[in-house]
Amino acid sequence: MINKIVQTMAEALDGIKDGSTVLIGGFGSVGQPDALIEALIEVGAKNLTIALNNAGSGRVGVAKLMDQGCVRKIICSFPRSSDPVVFETLYREGKLELEITPQGTLAERIRAAAAGIPAFFTATGAGTLLARGKESRVIDGREYILETALKADVALIEAWEADRWGNLVYRGSGANFNPVMAAAAELTVCQVQHIRELGSLHPHMIGTPGVYVNRVIQVDRGPEWTKE
Amino acid sequence: MTPFTRDQMAHRAADDIPEGWCVNLGIGIPTLVANHVPNTREVVFQSENGVVGMGPAPAKGSEDLWNINAGKQLITLVPGASFVGHADSFAMIRGGHIDLCVLGGFEVAENGDLANWATGENDTAPAVGGAMDLAAGAKRLWVIMDHTTKDGRPKLLEKCVYPLTGLKCVTRVYTNLATIDVVAGQGFVVRDMAPGLSFEALQAKTAAKLHQPH
């Protein structure tokens, strides 16, 4: 019997090593796997490369992960989110490497990794500072730059519902980076609000088939997030 | 001379959006554009975090924390709305399926170059977000911004000084003083101006040659 549901955070994050590349889903707090991020801080793996849209705010979540010295490098599109105090400090002190990537290029680099495509040409960023050091080519009269796939050891993601096969259903704008990240990592761990019986999730509603998912853990998001 | 207000700038841009377009609005004044498209004209607003068919802000008490826009503000959905993930949302943007993107700007050059993401090469941590994808991928790019900086320096230039977001991508600029088309091979063409403003006065606040429409 296939059963990807785990009961503890220790099982959920078992095997995450120092030096791993970790994709973290979510856009703002929507679809962001807060409980898994907290658990990753507990694991204490160091020298991580993390890829996500923002660089954390305040001193919680991803910001706390960086504050604890777990992160060597961050790949993101928008480091200046609200209150990026930890990021700004570490970056200024030279303790954190930043790779700034346009948001669509970030998503596409992850998608390419998921689809077995090592690199691709895109017009985004051509002729700008972000094209520095990248191969460029003119195709049909337009300039494109070469971007490489972003493959990861681990993806930490959030969904609304899951079954024991790891099939995932998202809620509202909560899909964002989660489905593409789920498909681009060796180990994909998902935090969900609800576990459903196998067969009860409608096939058309499944946003991520379980083939991409290794472990699922149920976490209660709290009343303000769970109003139907 | 009375400059246009933020809402008037947004309203003028909204007036130029025809029924049926799929439109992505940037953060700031561009977000206001949606408020000025009448309900009788169906325009589909896309947000790059994967919302196609975005409606106005929710009434108090009916918020759903799972529904936000790219500015991370709570939103509603219109009938016909759909969700996609980031990879599909940006394929929509980068693949040329967005009819119009409206962004704010630091500088626009007469060849259509846009600078709106960083204010210098030594910027501590530049944040690009989806601006470069939208600049490169939308069918049309309009910019809404003040005509000059707060200290009076022109923002419409022969060549951008700040790092570029996209090359030759802007097709129209709505400022607090005028609406200006960016025409390939010609440059800035003034469509109309704030009441009481002379062409010469507008030219004096612009660091590139302005052209009269034919």
Image (cartoon, coloured by chain):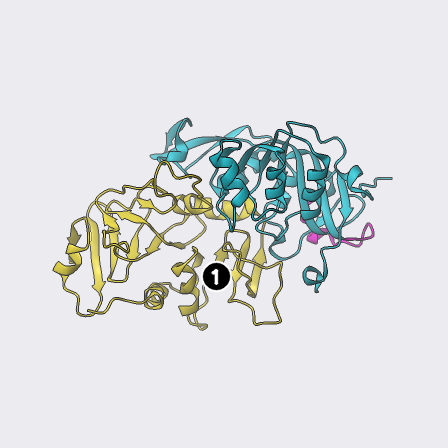
In the figure, the shade used to draw chain B is yellow
- Whether residue A55 appears in magenta in the rendering, the answer is no
**In which chain is the residue bearing label 1?**
B
Residue A57 spot, x, y in % from top left: 56, 48
Q: Is residue A169 left or right of residue A165?
A: left
- Please say whether residue A202 is one of the residues in the magenta stretch: yes
Q: Nearer the viewer, residue A20 or A102?
A: A20
Q: Nearer the viewer, residue A200 or A159?
A: A159
Q: Is residue A87 left or right of residue A141?
A: right
**In this rendering, is residue B125 above or below B63?**
above
Tell me if A129 is positioned left or right of A25 in this view: left
Residue A54 visible in this rendered orientation of the protein: no
Q: Colour of chain A?
A: cyan
Can residue B64 be seen here?
yes
Which residue, given by chain and number where applicable, does mark 1 sit on? B44
In the foreground, B187 or A81: A81
The disc labelled 1 sits on which kind of residue? Val
Residue B55, horizontal then vertical, whole percent: 52, 65
Quarter-of-image position of residue A8: top right
Q: Which residue occupies the extreme left position in the image?
A: B200
Image quadrant where one finds the N terminus of chain A: top right
Quarter of the image for the C terminus of chain A: give it. Answer: bottom right
Q: Position of residue A67 (x, y in %)?
A: 60, 39
Q: Which residues are magenta?
A: A194-208
Number of numbered discs on residues: 1
- Decide: few, some or many residues near mark 1? Use Cα within 10 Å; few <14, some 14-19, many ≥20: many
In-image side of B24 versus B77 (left or right): left
Question: Which residue sits at x=80%, y=54%?
Answer: A200
- Give the answer, above or below, for where B87 lies relative to A119: below
Comparing A83 with A186, the one in front is A83
